[in-house]
Each structure stands twice: as structure tokens, then as C-alpha cells.
Amino acid sequence: MKRSVYIFLLVFAVIVTGCATFYFIGTPRPDVALSPNAGPIAAKKELTVKLDAPRAVLKQLAVTALQDGRTVDVVTKSFTGVNQARETFTLAQAGLKEGPFKLQVTATAAPKHFGAVRTTTQAFTFEYENKPPEVTVLSLAHNITRGGAGLVVYTLSKEVEKTGVVFADQFVPGYRQGGTTYACLFPFPYNMNPDQYVPRVMAVDRAGNERVVGITYHLTVKPFPTDRISLSDAFLEKVAAEFKGKFPQAASPLEVFLKANGELRQQDARALLDYGRTTSPVPLWQGEFLRLPNAAPKGAFAQARTYIYQGKTVDQQTHLGVDLASLAHAEVPAANRGRVVHAGDLGLYGQCVVIDHGLGLQTLYGHLSRIGVKVGDNVEKGQIIGNTGATGMAGGDHLHFGVNVAGQSVNPIEWWDPSWIKNNITGKLDIGKPATAR
């Protein structure tokens, strides 16, 4: 009998101990993650705290700032019925002063059915900075033509997280050239209203402080040419044969053409924006850019094209390059030194090569019959990279030559002009160089 009582008491004690243990430590503490979690930070920079309470529900979050013995509540929030949460906040109302401080994050969770409330507290150390970087523009006059490009050279007073040129809703990155000097090559988009085009230099430091300064510039706006192109059945059959696989639901060669001329054109533009981010931070090119030798121009940059079929207008698009016609399968030289970032099929351009020349400047060679380079190749000015052809949306053998800045098409004619390059590009790049390096 005594033995049975002993066993009962022992089992009871184990059960009680187990229940007590589970009650107090069986529920895991909530996980806390803060981003950013250290370093310099400004009043307007957003911080994000993520909470995760597996097998439990969140109850409360408290974020407190501590500086020089002073405590300020930054975030206080209660939760109901969730086990994950994400809160974004700033320190704009915390009243902190320049210098080090800590953020203390406390999260509380409770089990869904049985158990003790568990709390996680973590402290993160930051440096409070509210002074934006100083931006000094070194380059003076900036003469920019719609559809063309400009370059600004400037210095920054501190390390930054983001810098470049902003206009309208667009941002073009600038690149460090050495020391505190930066350069930004930026476009004046062919289709942008000049009244909305106000280029300015922007810099955001690692704390999140932003400075925007203006530059001295003069805009030139010229009209772009137009053209009317009659579509023949033979051309439409050629296009249908090339692109039917991309648009299997198209019911006719005309429908294939219309889908390709619209949808593929948009896809190509997105691809070129991506390639524009794959660039050398310093110039790779030297001097003016080469033009396809002995070639006659067949299509102009930013030419508004109206497509006619059987006497009716069926489409309107803009031609973003210069078409150059020479002999069939003529050798195509690289316009300048650079690195190949694309070599292969590219939508409307057919077999195509894209070469990066640094600072976001890239050249495009479309409708090739043969490609003689591969991605990653370094090429020299004049090196043969392929042969002209009629691949893609081409009615005959020619080269579609394009120039892109930050992935946006600009007028190639500027880059064939040594005087324009010296006055607007290389002359400005020399400003930031030491006298011995010029």
C-alpha cells in the first residue's frame, strides 16, 4: 500500500512539475528583428521591426529610445489574435540630439491556450545624425537637347547610400570617380515634356539624410521626324514566321505584327533598363564613337512612325535608334571600348549585341545576321562584333544602332560628334581629375 502511494505521489509530482515547466518555459519567446539594426540614422529614416511568435499570439510591442539618461517612448502597440507583425516607424518625434543612443525593443507573447506570458527585450545601438551631405557641383554650363544626354560632376562631403540626378519621377545613379568626386550621365527623355524636366543632383547619406541641389542648364527642344510605312503582305509574312511562336493565339500575320510591335517593344525597353544597371562605374570608352562605315541612314532617332496596311493606319510607334544600311552582311565594328552585357536574341532587335561603356552609357547593335562576341567579352573600338542582317523586325539587311543612357534611348548622333563629346562629356570629366591626371 505504501509503495502504491509513493508511486502515485511520484507520478503526481512529475505531472505537476511538467505542467509548471511547460507553463513557464514551454512557450517560446517571440522573435524580434529590427532593420536597420545599427549605424547612423536620421529623424526621417524608416525603421522596421518584425515580430514572430510561433505557437503563441502577440500581445504587446514597445520601442523606447534611450539617450543620456533620458527615455522616450517611440512605439507602443497592442495586438489581438496574431502571431506575426511588422511595424514601421521613424524617430522624428523622439527629440533626440546628435550622437549615440539606443533603441530598446520589447515584445510580449502569450500561449494560445495554456502557459505563461513570455517577453523578449533587445537593445540596438545607433548614431543619430541629422546633417545632410554637402553637394558641390563642379561642372558649369549643361547644354542638353531633348532626346540627348548631359553629364554633371560634383563632390560630396561624406559617404552616401544613394546619389545621382533626379527629374520628374525618375532617378539616374551617379558613380564615384575617386575621392569625393562623382559623375552622373543622365538623359533628357525624348518623350518628356520640357516643363517637367528639371534635373537636380540628389544625395542620401547612410543615415537617411537627403540633399537636393540644382544645376545650371539650358534645354534645346527640336522636333523629331515622322514617317509613314506601308506594310506589305510579304513583310507581314516574314514577321509572322519570326514571331508566331511568341504569339500563338494571333489569328493573322497582321495581328502577329501588331502584338510584336507593341508588346515586344515594351519588353525590350524593360530589358534595356536592366542592362543599364549593369555598368562600369568609370568610363571605358575613349573619344568619339564609330559609325558603321560607308552606310546610308535609313531611319532617324525618335522618328514617329505610322504603319499603313491596305490604306488604313494600323499602328503608331517611335523608332529609338538610327538605321544604317551598307552592303548585305557588312562587318559591324564596336563603336567604342567596352564590355559586352548582351549577345543574343532581343525581341524586335533580333540577333543583338549590347556593349557597356561605363557610367550607364551603352550601345546597341540590332538585326545582326551573325554575332561574334559573347557576354563578358571586353571589346576595343573598331573590333568586329558581328555582321548586319534582317533578323527581328527588319524589312531588309541593315544595322539598328542605338545608344542608351541608364537604359533609356538617346540620340546616337551626339556620340558621333567629337566636339560635342569634348564639350559636354570628357571636358566635364576632366574637371574632377587631379591636374597631373588630365
Image (cartoon, helix red, strand yellow):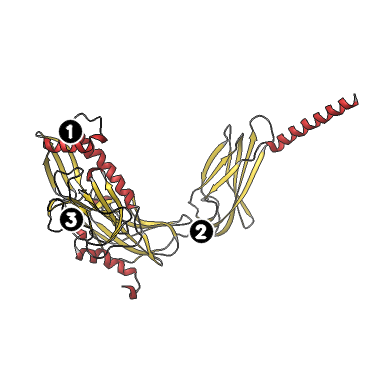
Give the x, y percent position of residue 210: 42, 56
Labels 2 and 1: the sequence-earlier one: 2
Which of the two marks, 2 or 3, is nearer to us in this view? 3
Q: Name the residue carrying label 1.
A: 253
**Secondary structure at numbered mark 1:** helix
The reply to whether dot 2 and dot 1 touch (C-beta < 8 Å) is no
Q: Name the residue carrying label 3.
A: 331
Q: Residues within 10 Å of mark 3 (few under 14, many from 20)?
A: some
**Amino acid type of the residue that numbered disc 1 sits on in the rendered structure:** Pro
123, above or below 137, in the image: above
Viewer-proximal residue among 185 and 344: 344
**Secondary structure at numbered mark 2:** loop
Give the x, y percent position of residue 15: 77, 30
Q: Is residue 167 visible?
A: no
Q: Residues within 10 Å of mark 2 (few under 14, many from 20)?
A: many
Labels 2 and 3: the sequence-earlier one: 2
296, above or below 255, in the image: below
Q: Name the residue carrying label 2.
A: 129
Q: CA distance from mark 2 to mark 3?
A: 57 Å
Return the residue found at the far right: 2
Labels 1 and 3: the sequence-earlier one: 1
Give the x, y percent position of residue 53: 60, 38
**Secondary structure at numbered mark 3:** strand
- Residue, x 53% and y 50% (percent of image)? 93
